[in-house]
Amino acid sequence: MNIQEYIKASKSNNFFLLAGPCVIEGEDMALEIAEKMVQATNDLDIPYIFKGSYRKANRTRIDSFTGIGDFKALNILKKVRDTFGIPVVTDIHLPSEAEIAAEYVDILQIPAFLCRQTDLLEAAAKTGKTVIIKKGQFLSPESMKYACQKVRDNGNKNVMVTERGTTFGYGDLIVDMRSIPLMKAACDAPVILDITHSLQQPNASGGVSGGLPQLISTIAKGGIAVGADGIFMETHQNPSFAKSDGANMLPLHDARALLEKLTILRKAVNEIG
């Protein structure tokens, strides 16, 4: 599936959305989230991409949940794609994972901490899939042009970048809204704003990241106002019971209301230019 054509197929000039659980916990939960998000995005004419990690590699504690099994989760992602006819995205952590994951998904996402890993970017690029690179919490927006160039130099022009906050001290992140137009200009690529990971409070003393989910709407509206092309968010039926990143997730039942507000705001931004 050509993601750029899929996004352009919407004539509403709306933002596109990547949304789903942090990690695939099971088939039923993934299909339920996808179904509700498809219903909402179809009503609002938002190009929708289902997001789910098949495995979590970046965990603080060794006893943290990492997944239900790689191929079991990848097959669930494929089932979501086949059931609803929508593209799916997952993240990869090692070069050897790129070709495997590419058999099941439409987009490969490079985690923020790995955005400078040349061999990982090259492996993702060579699959021919769209590659989304999350900006490292330690990088300037302009420096992301070099990560994008690594993908393009390997014959893949289908690249996007994601803003997900910048490290502020030991336990907080700050979203600099200037980074959205700056990355768009530097990378010549669509820019996505991650409205849930941007509100993480990492490095908590208990070894599990905290978060500020009450500010998800604030961050999202700011991103749309300054011209984000896409929105990334993690959502779950019951974030308090999510097996990963529940502290900064949007409850699934709140997703439609937020998307309605963002669609209204996007139309206003389009009108004023």
Image (tube, helix red, strand yellow):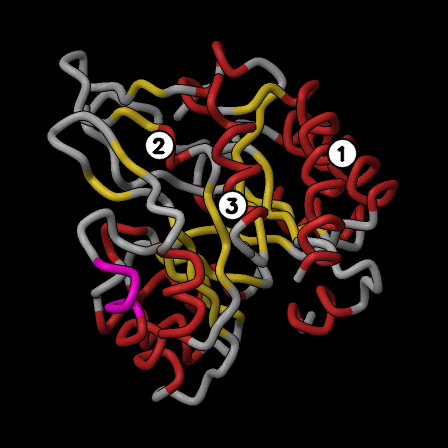
Labels 2, 1: front one: 1
Q: Element under label 1?
A: helix
Instruction: Determine crowd level at label 3: few under 14, some 14-19, many 20+ residues with C-alpha closer than 10 A.
Output: many
Span colored in magenta: 140-144
Q: Secondary structure at mark 2?
A: loop
Location of the C terminus by quadrant is: bottom right
Query: Left of 184 or right of it: where is 273?
Result: right
Q: Which residue is mark 1?
A: 260
Query: Is residue 147 placed above or below 105 in the rendered structure?
Result: below
Numbered mark located on residue 78 in the image: none
| Position of residue 157 measured from the top left corner of the image (x, y, whole percent) | 49, 83
Circle 3 sits in a helix, a strand or a loop, which is it?
Answer: helix
Do labels 3 and 2 touch, CB within 8 Å? no
How crowded pointer 1 is (Cα within 10 Å; few <14, some 14-19, many 20+) is rated as: some
Instruction: Give the residue type at disc 1.
Output: Glu
Most extreme residue toward the right is: 43
Q: Position of residue 172 (x, y in %)?
A: 23, 28
The residue at which mark 3 appears reads as: 223
- Residue 258 painted magenta: no
| Front in this rendered view, residue 71 or 242 | 242
Type of amino acid at the residue the image marks with label 3? Gly
Please indicate whether residue 122 sits to the left or right of residue 217 in the image. left
State the residue at coordinates (24%, 68%). 143
At x 36%, y 74%, the residue is: 186
Left or right of 176: which side holds 53?
right
The numbered disc on residue 66 is: 2
